[in-house]
Image: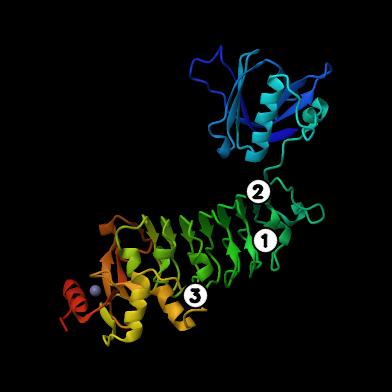
């Protein structure tokens, strides 16, 4: 058997606690020697030759406290080496350690464990982890992409819809950059489980796919496209920490943005068609620390945008659904009510949910007051941003008007 992972070999006798050795990609495996004994073969891809370690009565200990994170250390007696493994496949690592344990005590290994060849291990090539394509001629049209890729950058201007589906089945990809192409649409049903960075800057995207599964996506850059709204699919990427939507044609920021993107720290909505922002972006208690909003046609006057205070049965019912966290979907509630529940906002005074009946005002606010760094580039834009606040009742609404310095109604 053999296993790809990161390996660091330390000589216990030479270590003084200040080792400068770094882990490097390599392969570790089990092989049978000429005298029919199991040996451990270790090779770093940067080295040509592999090292062999006798196993029988030669393993001091196996440190496997972090085995579920793909990490373990094999302590060899002679030579006194610590072989530290990381980024290994957990199941394969467990099999390797249990096999080493058996071999060290002279027991037979299960028949499923096959001996690997030292020649094969020494001929293995370093897996290709990164590919950058800057011109169309470099595109691997016929041979396809190496399945080991972790980072893929295609900035060659020639990618257009439909985008090559072979890109989206690369299982190890953590960074995908398709900037500066001519993509108008991404494939539907995208599912990339290791992707943490997706950059599709400077394309011609008009919308985002309806189904898009990237469970650990942290950075999403869709700047310089033609998006007209922030799709629900984007709001469902609840691991996002950085979202760049600058230079699009977006008119509204959904009220529920920070309720759904609760990890969001940096939000760039500069150069769009935003006239005001929802109150959640101006509220404390979120992770947002940097907000770019320059070059938007912001409202400069304070105004009342809604004043509707007939408390209805629907309003009271929906408030109860939120208060008691009652699960709902299209099967149990009419769609219109589901949408209202998805988009509700809390009262800017008492934090009760507001759904159909509320008062709404737009007032300028300083986001720096809640610890958010605001970036403006246009000289004529102030640091105050028009914020749309909702109030649940006449009492709260009057409080809001008073606080905003507007006439009490
Ligand atoms: Zn209220």
Asked if the residue at label 3 sits under 8 Å from ligand 1, the reply is: no
In the rendered image, the residue lying farthest to the right is: 34
- Point 43% across, 57% down: residue: 264
Residues packed near mark 3 inside 10 Å, few (<14), some (14 to 19) or many (20 plus): few
Q: Examine the rendered structure and indicate whether residue 143 appears above or below residue 387.
A: above
Pair 1/2: label in front:
2
Q: Which residue is mark 3?
A: 329
Residues packed near mark 1 inside 10 Å, few (<14), some (14 to 19) or many (20 plus): some
Q: Where is residue 52, by image quadrant?
A: top right
Q: Which residue is mark 2?
A: 172
Q: Which residue is mark 1?
A: 157
Q: CA distance from mark 1 to mark 3?
A: 42 Å
Ligand 1 picture quarter:
bottom left
Q: Position of residue 212 (x, y in %)?
A: 59, 64
Q: Where is residue 95, by image quadrant?
A: top right
Horizontal placement of 374 versus 189: left or right?
A: left
Nearest the viewer among 335 and 232 is 335
Secondary element at image label 3: loop
* Image quarter (top left, top right, bottom left or bottom right) of the C terminus: bottom left
Residues packed near mark 2 inside 10 Å, few (<14), some (14 to 19) or many (20 plus): some
Nearest the viewer among 310 and 376 is 310
Q: Position of residue 350 (x, y in %)?
A: 23, 70
**Label for residue 228?**
none
Q: Position of residue 246 (x, y in %)?
A: 48, 64
Q: Position of residue 305 (x, y in %)?
A: 30, 82
- Point 46% across, 83% down: residue: 336
Horizontal placement of 44 versus 285: left or right?
A: right
Nearest the viewer among 110 and 123 is 110
Secondary element at image label 2: loop
């Amino acid at each position: 058997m053999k296993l790809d992972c990161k390996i660091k070999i330390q000589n216990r006798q030479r270590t003084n606690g200040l080792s400068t050795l770094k882990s490097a990609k390599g392969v570790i495996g089990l092989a049978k020697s000429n005298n029919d004994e199991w040996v451990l073969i270790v090779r770093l891809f940067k080295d040509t030759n592999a090292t062999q370690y006798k196993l029988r009565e030669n393993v001091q200990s196996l440190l496997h406290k972090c085995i579920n994170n793909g990490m373990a250390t094999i302590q060899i007696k002679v030579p006194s080496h610590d072989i530290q493994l990381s980024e290994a496949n957990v199941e394969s690592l467990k099999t390797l350690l249990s096999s080493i344990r058996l071999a060290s005590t002279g027991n037979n290994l299960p028949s499923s464990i096959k001996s690997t060849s030292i020649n094969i291990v020494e001929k293995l090539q370093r897996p290709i982890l990164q590919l950058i394509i800057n011109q169309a001629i470099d595109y691997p049209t016929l041979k396809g992409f190496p399945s080991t890729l972790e980072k893929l950058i295609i900035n060659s201007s020639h990618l257009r819809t439909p985008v090559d589906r072979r890109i989206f089945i690369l299982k190890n990809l953590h960074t995908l950059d398709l900037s500066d192409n001519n993509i108008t649409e991404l494939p539907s049903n995208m599912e990339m489980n290791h992707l943490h960075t997706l950059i599709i800057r400077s394309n011609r995207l008009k919308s985002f796919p309806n189904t898009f599964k990237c469970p650990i996506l942290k950075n999403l850059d869709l700047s310089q496209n033609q998006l007209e709204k922030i799709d629900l699919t984007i709001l469902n990427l609840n691991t996002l920490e950085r979202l760049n939507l600058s230079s699009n044609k977006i008119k509204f920021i959904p009220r529920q943005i920070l309720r759904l993107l609760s990890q969001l720290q940096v939000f760039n909505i500069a150069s769009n068609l935003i006239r005001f922002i929802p109150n959640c972006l101006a509220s404390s208690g979120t992770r947002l620390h940097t907000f770019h909003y320059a070059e938007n046609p912001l409202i400069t006057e304070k105004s009342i945008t809604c004043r509707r205070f007939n408390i209805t049965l629907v309003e009271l019912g929906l408030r109860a659904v939120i208060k008691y966290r009652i699960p709902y979907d299209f099967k149990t509630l009419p769609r219109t009510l589901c949408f209202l529940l998805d988009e509700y906002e809390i009262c800017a005074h008492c934090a009760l949910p507001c759904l159909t009946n509320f008062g709404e005002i737009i007032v300028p606010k300083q986001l720096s007051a809640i610890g958010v760094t605001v970036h403006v580039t246009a000289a004529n834009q102030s640091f105050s941003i028009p914020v749309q606040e909702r109030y649940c009742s006449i009492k709260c609404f009057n409080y809001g008007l008073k606080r905003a310095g507007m006439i009490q109604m």
